[in-house]
Image (spheres, rainbow, N blue to C red):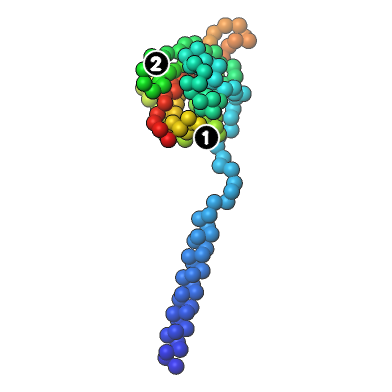
Amino acid sequence: MAILRTKRRRWVAGAVALVVVSIGTLAGLPTGGKRQSLPINMPSISAFADFSPITPPGLVPKDVLTALLIPRKSTRTGWHNYDQGNGQYDREITITVQADSSSTKNFFKATLSDMAWKILSSQNVSSGYEILGLHSGSDGHFWEIGVTISPSSSRVGTPKSTGDSSSVALRLLQYESA
């Protein structure tokens, strides 16, 4: 009789362990829902045209530049070619966004996440706020974007043009082979 009780206890203990493991496994499975991020708070366009003065066709894969969005009501104010055609791509554009720095920061955090950029860091820096993201391009390279948002400045003028603006630097680098 003692042997039957021992076997029964082992059987019950094994069944309980199996149920616990099964529930844990099922709880860890992805649900298939879309990952939620911040809502995009401004109309957007691709940065493709803004990078065109310093990016000959074919140098950066189209899927990388179309995945980089900027606010529709922004103005390119400058650009810089750091690599000068030597080595990996390293170029930057600066834009002025017609919004305060907080709204601009939320825009870039949301659009980078939504456009399949992996956010590597997002932090305050001495020049404002910086977001670093990584994207895998169709050319087999990783591409890194650095978005530096300077603090807002007030624009003074007619009632139609009164508001805040932010200066944003977008530095795109060819990172490494994927």
Which quarter of the picture shows residue 98?
A: top right
Mark 1 closeness class: few <14, some 14–19, many ≥20 residues within 10 Å: some
Direction top: furthest residue: 158
From this view, report whether residue 6 is shown above or below residue 165: below
Quick one: quadrant of the N terminus?
bottom left
Which quarter of the picture shows residue 73?
A: top right
Query: Residue tagged by mark 1?
Result: 116
Q: Nearer the viewer, residue 112 or 168?
A: 112
The residue located at (51%, 65%) in the rendering is 22
Point out residue 50 in the picture as x, y percentages from the top left corner. 53, 16
**2 or 1: mark nearer the eye:** 2
**Secondary structure found at label 1:** loop
Query: Residue tagged by mark 2?
Result: 85
Q: Nearer the viewer, residue 100 or 136?
A: 136
**Secondary structure found at label 2:** loop
Point out residue 155 in the picture as x, y percentages from the top left corner. 53, 10
Q: Nearer the viewer, residue 97 or 169?
A: 169
| Callout 1 amino acid | Ala
Q: In 3D space, how far apart are the residues under numbered discs 2 and 1 (Cα atoms)?
A: 27 Å
Label at residue 41: none
Quick one: quadrant of the C terminus?
top left
Mark 2 closeness class: few <14, some 14–19, many ≥20 residues within 10 Å: few
Point out residue 131 in the picture as x, y percentages from the top left corner. 44, 28
The residue located at (58%, 33%) in the rendering is 39
| Callout 2 amino acid | Gly
Q: Nearer the viewer, residue 56 or 6?
A: 56
The residue located at (47%, 79%) in the rendering is 11
Q: Earlier in the sequence, mark 2 or mark 1?
A: 2
Residue 94 visible in this rendered orientation of the protein: no
Residue 126 visible in this rendered orientation of the protein: yes
